[in-house]
Amino acid sequence: SPGRKVLIVYAHQEPKSLNGSLKRVAVEELSKQGCSVTVSDLYAMQFEPRATRNDIVGCLHNSEEFNYGVETWEAYKRGGLSSDLIEEQKKVQEADLLIFQFPLYWFSMPAIMKGWMDRVLVQGFAYEFPNCYDSGLLKNKLALFSFTTGGSREMYAKGGISGDIRYLLWPMQHGIMHFCGVKVLAPHICFAPEYVSEEKRKEMLTAWAQRLKTLWKEEPINCSPEWYFK
Amino acid sequence: SPGRKVLIVYAHQEPKSLNGSLKRVAVEELSKQGCSVTVSDLYAMQFEPRATRNDIVGCLHNSEEFNYGVETWEAYKRGGLSSDLIEEQKKVQEADLLIFQFPLYWFSMPAIMKGWMDRVLVQGFAYEFPNCYDSGLLKNKLALFSFTTGGSREMYAKGGISGDIRYLLWPMQHGIMHFCGVKVLAPHICFAPEYVSEEKRKEMLTAWAQRLKTLWKEEPINCSPEWYFK
């Protein structure tokens, strides 16, 4: 793993949170392995989640009727995306592995991270029809969703009130990452850390560090409906 | 339906878009029925999607370690949420029906709308353990997700490359609306409007207006895994 590049996209407001600790553990462990690690700390960056005309520098392709997908595609091709997007795209381009670290909000990622997906992964950069899914433009990269939940493992069991946790991974892992050609490693989930002891939370951090030690030997999941819905 | 109240939460940058037209059609048709219709036009409002300390007015419950869920819950109870959130909560409280109108971004709603969910539906207002799912605090309300897609109906078929469209509805309909006690009407989906003729797009608008005429007679879906994953 020496020389491998990792981008951690991190969305928590509080450095002292478990998410903050999970992020730090990843930076430390991966750096120790000789990886080069970059963090996009979205709240600290005050990252803009809204997809607007401001993402295009200069004139629009069609100023009569604003179409975000078309405009960002055209802007990407002529190097006319806003600088914050170009910056994030560079980090993605260089990375071998993307780690998304966040607390689950409403069965999904926080809006600030969804905005990162909406704005950074534009057509031309991340995919370009018909190059999507296995031929997406970000192929040869890996992604891993690492998150904490409010609900317990039992709530997120098959037959539990919130349904199998894998159900909610479909849009994020298949709909976003697989669509861009990125291979997906098994998610890393810390269930209900707010309701366990300080000791249990420490164990969660240790388990994450432990997993990271052999991460580069892991095989991606088979990102198809069978994995999610059996 | 006279006297019924409808809130349309709308997320598109361009009034001339099909989403803009679908929103207008809904306002017109429902108003004609005697409903009172309110629109939250998120881009026009420059709605803030980021969940931050700014959502709490005055002192924090725990300023040592910021926990968004705890802080907004406490702020809600003492009337200390930011005014934009109180405003949206009032609209939700008064509504019999919530319509979410948006273009599908990455198998989900645009970040600006996800931010509306993250920030408006706080504990104490939308749910309060153990009052969630069928006993969520917004019971006796209805919700309907109305959206456009980039991909075609074939891509979103069972066995299609993007999987059954119902797979991606789980986090939005079950994870958010059902969690808050809201009953969910069948979604309204316009597939790939950018790739069809102007005439087809007009038919899409007519079909939506037509559906709205008998909307109040519809039964909610059975919002359980069977509906989504068969």
Image (cartoon, coloured by chain):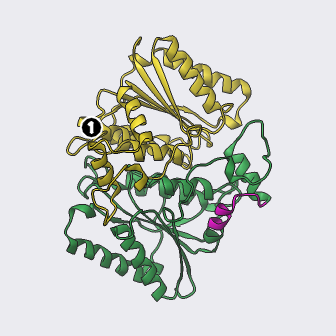
Chain colours: A green, B yellow
Q: Horizontal placement of A149 versus A1: left or right? A: left
Name the amino acid type tagged 1: Gly
Residue that badge 1 annotates: B136
Picture residue at 33% right of the left edge, 49% below the top = B72
Q: Is residue B81 visible?
A: yes
Residue B211 percent coordinates (x, y): 51, 19
The residue tagged with tag 1: helix, strand or loop? loop
Vertical comparison of A221 with A167: above or below: below
Q: Horizontal placement of B141 versus B163: left or right? A: left
Image quadrant of residue B26? top right
Residue B174 percent coordinates (x, y): 36, 41
How many residues crowd around disc 1 within 10 Å: few (fewer than 14), some, or many (20 or more)?
A: many
Residue B48 percent coordinates (x, y): 50, 47
Residue B209 percent coordinates (x, y): 56, 18
Q: Horizontal placement of A44 versus A92: left or right? A: left
Q: Quadrant of the N terminus of chain B?
A: top left
Residue B64 lies in the magenta stretch: no
Picture residue at 66% right of the left edge, 55% below the top = A122
Q: Which residues are magenta?
A: A79-89
Q: Nearer the viewer, residue B58 or B34?
A: B58
